Amino acid sequence: MTEYSDLAAIVKSTQGDYPIWVGWDTIDEIGERLNSILDVSTAYIITDEGVHRQARRAQFSLEAAGIAAHMFIMPAGETHKTLETVQLVYRWLAERKAERGHMIVAVGGGVVGDLAGFVAATYLRGLPLAQVPTTLLAMMDAAVGGKVAVDLPQGKNLVGAFYQPKFVLVDVSTLQTLPKRELTSGWAEAIKHGLILDRDLLDAFETHRHSLLALEQDVATDIIRRSVAIKANVVSQDERETLGIRILLNYGHTIGHAIESTTGYSSFLHGEAVSVGMMGAARIGNAMGLLADEEVERQRQLLESYGLPLTCGEMDIAAVRNAMMSDKKVAGRAIRWVLLDGIGNAITRNDVPAAVVQQTLEALAVD
């Protein structure tokens, strides 16, 4: 494999190790980089209406490298991350006589990455997959680690698999085309990595806030590369979330996912819901004697400084609690909460009293 200077990490996986590259204007090199890893004659790009221009850049690069490239453009949004959309893609692949040695290339945000990855994992019992995330949220979360899935009406990501890509190509420059709200949403997952595992990274998010928010090339690429590397390292240690390490990445997600599902995935972007969920988890950690008042305040100020929400307004607390009990982290009817035992030190607890959860949700349900 050709060495590239923008390598963020090599993910260790039972399905094969793979590189994560984080650079600037690298989407135009995808054909060359794919050829450095695999011998592929045909690629099927899956993208959505919001980022198809970036997907065209990938298509041109693949074709210039001698790889035939077809494109499927799905509607944008979480509401389309369904088995119905998957079936449309299956039909499209069948019509083009896709073969097992051909490749799926996901170009887009988390919805595209999750759905395209699920297609790759299941069509012909598995096609090679490349993840090319174009949103900050997908760069930090969905594209790294091999979790692929679609939603059911009963909940998010309930049908899925662990299916690792052959590589992840992160082009930070693509973030310049993101709507401001989507970019803001993505900072939640990036900041989360500092909160749970890396105090120095958290310091960097505080120190370089203006440069990051302006997407200054060198600073943004460096810090995003560092944040992505944290997730890659966790995934390498606990690929299938069986050792209690990878679950730490779910800080803020128990409440966040419940808020998303009970509002029909229409009121909050994922990162916004996770931000609210992290404030809920911080409150719980504080009530459990794990997180000092000043640490809760530090988290609050940082999230607020990146434009992220801290509360979610009026919500159906009973429905949120019910949704939390459908979460994949529930075992024996007890929620495994990811909490902070101090900044940079995430742990899990399954003994959070119901009264503390209720008080936390009530505190979040304000404007």
Image (tube, rainbow, N blue to C red):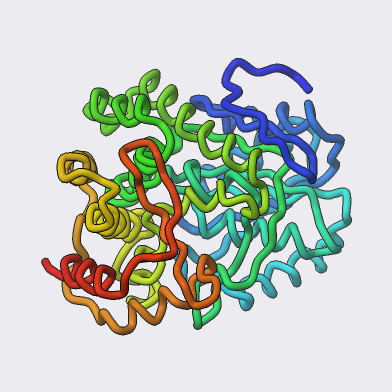
Where is the C terminus found, in terms of image quarters? bottom left
Is 324 placed above or below 277 here?
below
Q: Nearer the viewer, residue 122 or 32?
A: 122
Q: Position of residue 298 (x, y in %)?
A: 19, 39
**Which residue shows up at 62% across the image and 32% down it?**
20
Please state which of residues 266 and 257 is positioned toward the viewer in this rendering.
Answer: 257
Residue for point 58% across, 37% down: 232
From where the camera sits, is residue 43 visible? yes
Quarter-of-image position of residue 71: bottom right
Percent position of residue 88, x then y:
67, 73
Position of 244 compared to 323: left or right? right
Task: Determine whether 69 is above or below 326 in the image.
Answer: above
- Viewer can see residue 177: no
For this view, does 208 lie left or right of residue 260? left
Looking at this view, is 330 or 5 the one in front?
Answer: 330
Q: Position of residue 193 (x, y in %)?
A: 42, 39
Residue 252 pos. (x, y %) = 36, 56
- The residue sitting at 42% across, 54% down in the picture is 338
> Which of the pair 65/160 is nearer the observer?
160
Number of dots carrying numbers: 0
Give residue 311's quadrant in the image.
bottom left
In the picture, the quarter occupied by the N terminus is top right
Residue at point 40% right, 46% down?
189
